[in-house]
Image: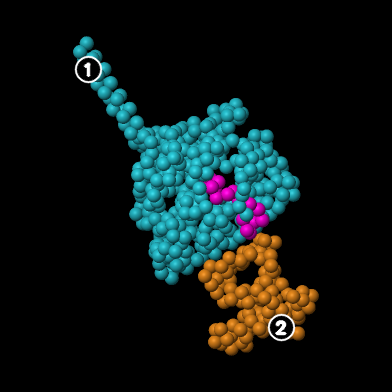
Chain colours: A orange, B cyan
Amino acid sequence: MTNHEQQFVCNPQVQERWLEHDVVLYHPATDDVTLLDHIGARIWSALGTSTSVTSMATTLAQEFNTNASAIVDDIQELVQTLRDKQLIESLDASAADDDMRA
Amino acid sequence: MSTLHQRLRHNFWATVALMARIAARYRPQRTDEFRGRWDLIDPALSDEKLARVAKALVELAMTEWTADVVVDFDDRATQAFLARHRVTTSLPLRCVKGEEQRNELRTRLHTIYGVQMRIETTARVVIDELREIGIDARVLKGLASAQLDYPHPELRQTGDVDLAIPAGTVEAAYNHLKQRGYLDYAHAPASTHLLKGVTLRAANGIEVDLHDRLFQRSPMTSALFDELGQQVPNLGTQALNVNFRLVHAAGHFILAPPGTRRMSGFLDTVVLRNNPDVDLTLTLAIAERLGIARLVGSSLRLEAALSGRNDHDLQAWPAADWLERRTRLQTERNLTLDQLSRFREVPRSRWLTYLPYWIVPEARRRKLFKRRALEQWRRLTGTQRR
């Protein structure tokens, strides 16, 4: 399993508030507020059910009429940021940790 | 002799004229006399542009935010007005002209939404912590209204956590929360035995207000908890029922000095008056029981006048007496009369303990007195501050 195949899902503790296509996230444990623009918010929305970076890249590439390989790194970067802020969690935490370190 | 007689006669008629003027000023209120009195919400609303913003917000509130209104969000005065009254979130993006103005509002809303979620989380934590020592809290004002009275919770901005707790539990709640790391908001209360309410600050900086009564002058009873409440879905506890909420919103809206968050309480009153579950007869009974019927009556009349509502159903409500009219409704509040009226807010059983504070007000109030006295002196002598 590569990095891009790991399954992630929103941390259920995180609160969200939508403003049109943007979303503001608040993590009570870290007291951190994060703003996602409409593309970030679309990714956040996809993370409502467990999904991988590859799967998100494929879906978004179809939606935005682009190539999945062109956006996969950007999605991976956002996923990493969300993970660092504990806003999402890996379904297999230990394996994910190993892969992220790789 | 004839000169003295003339002078006396003149003085008599002068006195009669003065009494007539005073009587006219303090005659029973009618909704009519509040018509167009946006200055009672904020003196700054004498500015036509700001008044249009306020009217647009009321129109939105009257139509459950479906009205097609357009507001200029391009000048600092409008932005400051909305921020000062904590009603920025009541203005939907679609009602703002142009992409640039929408982006400006969007940025502000992002920040406010972050704070709102922090406040909601703090409320949940405090409610749970009070439950640990057997204190059942009810959510007041913004947090309750946002969930129960507005079509979308995002439309109601909240500044702090306001909770009602049963009479006699303030001291225990205060001590427990202090142990849990909450700080006194400004200074420690002089005596925890005299507490009617307390303000603390959570570790994340959010203000937490605990009250054991809705208004200072209200008797300290379990009335708030005897009535059936209404569940607040996201906070795991109850709020006051809808009639209590209207009394609270209307009373606090008129108690707040003009220019300081009156618009927020005013919009609460508008949406609650539109709620078909509100029973004005029950609301009046609650207000009378809490000793604030005149105050709430004035507030409801002002709301009716400014929102264009029919006021026939307010006939039974008493008008505010002259002291309240001078201290609560005026845009320029008279601090001396305000100090006098504060005494009336203290339950009779506590008059003696309040006497020292009444004679020697707290430092902040003394400072206000001094500043106002200086302003009056400058006005009288015609000297301006350099």
Which residue is painted at 55% across and 74% down in the image?
A38
The answer for which chain carries disc 2 is A
In which quarter of the view is residue B63 placed?
bottom left
Quarter of the picture holding the C terminus of chain B: top left
Callout 2: SS: helix
Q: Which residues are magenta?
A: B232-251
- Tell me, yes or no, whether the highlighted magenta stretch contains residue B40: no
At x 40%, y 67%, the residue is B97
Name the residue located 57 percent from the left edge and 42 percent from the top edge. B214
Disc assigned to residue A5: 2
Q: Vertically, is B295 above or below B109?
A: above
Q: Is residue B123 visible?
A: no
Amino acid on which disc 2 is placed:
Glu
Q: Is residue B19 left or right of residue B240?
A: left
Residue B213 position (above or below residue A99): above
The residues bearing labels 2 and 1 have C-alpha atoms spaced at a distance of 104 Å
In this rendering, do the residues under marks 2 and 1 share a single chain? Answer: no
Quickly name the residue at label 1. Answer: B6
Q: Are marks 2 and 1 in contact (CB under 8 Å)?
A: no
Q: Tell me residue B222's x, y (percent).
A: 64, 40
Q: Chain of mark 1?
A: B
Q: Residue B53 in the image: x percent, y percent?
A: 40, 57
| For residue B294, above or below residue B277 | above
Q: Which mark is residue A25?
A: none
Asked whether B240 falls inside the magenta stretch, the response is yes
- Residue B242: image location, x then y, percent: 55, 50
Farthest residue to the top: give it.
Answer: B1
Quarter placement of the N terminus of chain B? top left
Within 10 angstroms of label 2, few (less than 14), some, or many (20 or more) residues? few
- Residue B303: in sight, yes or no? yes
Mark 1: amino acid: Gln
